[in-house]
Amino acid sequence: MSNSSTRIAVLVSGGGTNLQALIDAQKRGEIGNGEISLVIASKPDVYALTRASDNGIESKVLARKEYESIADYSKALVDVMKNANIDLVVLAGFLTIFDEQVYNAFPNRILNVHPALIPSFCGKGYYGLHVHEAALNKGVKVSGATVHIVTPECDAGPIVLQKAVEVLQGDTSETLQKRIMEQAEWKILPEAVRLFCDGKIIVENNRVTIKGE
């Protein structure tokens, strides 16, 4: 990788709190040579688009309902990101399914943050508050967040970083979600992006090694 900046696309479907964490980290100089170049939303009028425009970041709406199939939608995603010369794709609460066209276009270059310690409470159906409800129903004492590389199998890609967060007595799914965001997601997602942009992430045999850290 040359000294030119690593161009990052952040894909969102909602409020964009993880996008904000990345924007804030970029302002503090904490994502290496990374630059958030594009925000793509899967629906119009989400607050994440306001965050992008407030920070002078180009954004685009690719509404899933405007495409007949997952394949058509995936092709549009790839085309937009290729045209923007994107190097790294970050899923920040992106709830729209795409197919192998995206994985093939960006192999080992898609990061996702999941609000649990994978392999617990992950896979199909585990998103948003459902994750925290499941953790509380199980009575776990520790939960947290995981940043992993995205592969075709849901939440099964190589793990980059994890951070544990204590579950407190009396927690609701909302209070646990907030604590995991603040103490884990908003810290390890920018850190994983920095590691990628600095060329520190090596993927072999479905495992991540972090170089010289």
Image (cartoon, grey):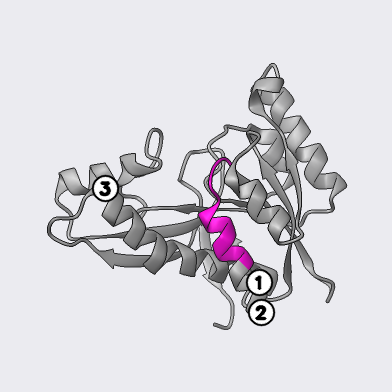
Kindly state the secondary structure of the residue where label 3 is placed: helix
x and y percentages locating residue 209 in the rendered image: 53, 69
Mark 3 vs mark 2, CA separation in Å: 33 Å
Q: Is residue 91 visible?
A: yes
Q: Which residues are magenta?
A: 13-23
> Quarter of the image containing the C terminus?
bottom right
The foreground one among 37 and 158 is 37
Q: Nearer the viewer, residue 212 or 204?
A: 212
Decide which of tag 3 and tag 1 comes sooner along the chain: 1
For residue 66, which quarter of the picture? top right
Q: Residue at x 57, y 60 (%)?
A: 20
Q: CA distance from mark 1 to mark 2?
A: 5 Å
At 81% from the left and 41% from the top, the residue drawn is 80
The residue indicated by pointer 2 is 29
Inspect the image, locate mark 3, and give the three-letter code of the amino acid beneath it.
Ser
Q: Which residue is mark 3?
A: 173
Give the residue at mark 1: 26
Q: Earlier in the sequence, mark 3 or mark 2?
A: 2
Inspect the magenta stretch and tell me whether residue 21 lies in it. yes
